[in-house]
Amino acid sequence: MNAPNKKTPSFSCCSSSFFVLLLVAVTLALVFLSSNHSPTLYLYIEKPSTLVQAAEAPAPISSYPKEITSKAPAPTSPTQNGEKQDRKLKYKRYSKLGRIEANLAKARSTIKEAALVRNLTSTHEDPEYVPQGPIYRNANAFHRSYLEMERLFKIYIYEEGEPPMFHDGPCKSIYSTEGRFIHEMEKGRFYRTKDPDQAYAYFLPFSVVMMVEHLYIPGSHEIHAIGRAMIDYIHIISNKHPFWNRSLGADHFMLSCHDWGPRASSYVPDLFNKSTRVLCNANTSEGFDPTKDASFPEINLRTGETTGLIGGYSPSRRPILAFLAGRLHGHIRYLLLEQWKNKDQDVQVYDQLPEGVAYNSMLKRSRFCLCPSGYEVASPRVVEAIYAECVPVLISDSFVPPFSDVLNWKSFSVQVKIKDIPNIKNILTSISQRQYLRMQRRVKQVQRHFVPNEPPKRFDVFHMTIHSIWLRRLNIQIQDQ
């Protein structure tokens, strides 16, 4: 055969390059054209009964508006130049949102894959804690989700508003978890970003507790002043920033441990219907929606510390079958007192403890601790029982327990319907000693998720609250306008 012409490779390479460049140009044009779709807010409503359902929402959008990098013709007027700058800034913002949504799509996929592993122990390595056991709905999926949250999640806190009603809150008393969360977010040690374009979620840093203290007129039984404050606040941030209007508040969240948190949020329809409301008063009969709202534990820290609250006696040193002490606060407690007060030494129910009897000591000497709702569904007794290693007995018909999209409450608590209050003793005595010991061990295991630490520690109540917000953010997909 004759030797090949040396010019042939050069000619072929140029031809290939030409067709490759042509193909790339056509592809870019098609991507650009396909990306100019009208803005849509995608919400995926999933039943929150398992982490898998809460976190594996599909990602139907295959393309996002791309940042334009090619040079446009030189502008012919200052007006055109200004329009060009607006377009460039808009495309740049779209690109950042697109990257955030792409990261969320990958996180959903990895969590979905992890959920297929049904082991009781997570297969993911972790030097501090590996979730395991039946206290989790799916230990592997939860652990994967938690690790993805630590890797990706960033929260922007709006700076508008003045203390004490904004950026502040109580760190003692029954509302302590509200104030502690706000203060920790303000410190910025975890998850906070100062760049709103880098945020996956946006925190509305108002305290309903402080609004009640400063705006409510005692005895008036109306909260219109608080409602007006919330309307004005959302009006300010929605006019000053583009993020609320972009999602209609769907990637925003508020947090409240006050009973009036749900009512206060109702003054802003999008806040009530679309935003994530992290509430102690997680009452499904009052509009709490577990697919977008998150239940938050109520913790009564009288001194601001957990010193002396955590720990209890061994099962063999718990002679009391069931215990409750509390004021007449709602119809459920009235039924309990009517049925059990001074009726049975096994089920000890008090509206006021006898002199010299310590409340915490009674918790630690009881096998089961009754945790009825009061006027509202939230009760600090749930966490008090967990701290005292006493198996909680939840008595409510519409309460969503904290972190219930991750935690399997049936494995470490007893749930009693209001109509079954007369049968409480029969229900509890029907639980075998072997099963009780299992439940009590699980209460001790789940403790770490309800403890407030300073500074916060991984998997504690602060991080678990953030994880609940993270799961709700996974459930939505947003496109900019």
Image (spheres, rainbow, N blue to C red):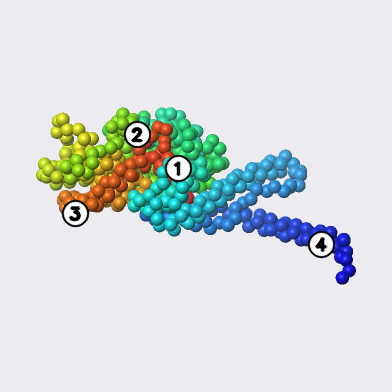
- Disc 4 and disc 2 in contact, CB within 8 angstroms: no
Q: Is residue 35 left or right of residue 206?
A: right
Q: CA distance from mark 3 to mark 2?
A: 36 Å
- Disc 2 and disc 1 in contact, CB within 8 angstroms: no
Q: Provide residue 469's location: percent of width, then percent of height.
A: 43, 45
Kind of element beneath mark 4: helix
Amino acid carrying label 3: it is Ser
Residue 384 picture quarter: top left
Q: CA distance from mark 3 to mark 4?
A: 84 Å
Q: Nearer the viewer, mark 3 or mark 1?
A: 1
Q: Nearer the viewer, mark 3 or mark 2?
A: 3
Residue position marked by numbered label 1 in the rendering: 127
Residue position marked by numbered label 3 in the rendering: 430
In this view, the residue farthest toward the bottom is 1
Disc on the earlier residue, 3 or 2: 2
Residue at left 80%, top 59%?
13
Residue position marked by numbered label 2 in the rendering: 176
Residue position marked by numbered label 4 in the rendering: 12
Q: Nearer the viewer, mark 1 or mark 4?
A: 1
